[in-house]
Image: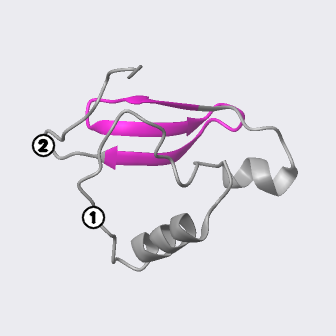
Amino acid sequence: MKLTAKNKQHIDDMMNGEPEHTDEFSDGLGICAYFHCALCIAVGAPQDISAGWTLHGLQVWCNVHGVNILHVDFEGRQHPGITSRGK
């Protein structure tokens, strides 16, 4: 996926604590940034990443280095989600 100027601005806004919220929430491809293992990048290793649900929320894991990349704690709250495949 090519990073467009709009996607880059959205990522910059999120990093600065100013996310743009839109009502667009669909089962179409909306990824504007991907998870990466910093250790894999540092050593030039191919990445092998898993993502899944935990008792607390969602975790992204590097299978190459056996380390956490991200673990989001939903603090027991439910969030909207789309699990359909669309067309």
Q: Main secondary structure of the magenta part?
A: strand
Q: Name the residue under label 2.
A: 77
Q: Is residue 68 magenta?
A: yes
Q: Based on the displayed image, in which of its 4 quarters is residue 61 positioned?
A: top right
Q: Residue 52 carries which label?
A: none
Image position, residue 12 (x, y; %): 50, 75
Q: Which mark is residue 21?
A: 1
Image position, residue 74 (x, y; %): 22, 45
- In the figure, 45 relative to 9: above or below? above
Q: Is mark 1 on a helix, strand or loop?
A: loop
Q: Which amino acid does label 1 sit on?
A: His
Magenta part of the protein: which range? 50-72
Residue at the limit of the structure toward the right, as seen here: 44
Q: What residue type is labelled 2?
A: Arg
Q: Based on the displayed image, in which of its 4 quarters is residue 57 positioned?
A: top left
Q: In which quarter of the image is the C terminus?
A: top left
Chain-order first, disc 2 or disc 1: 1
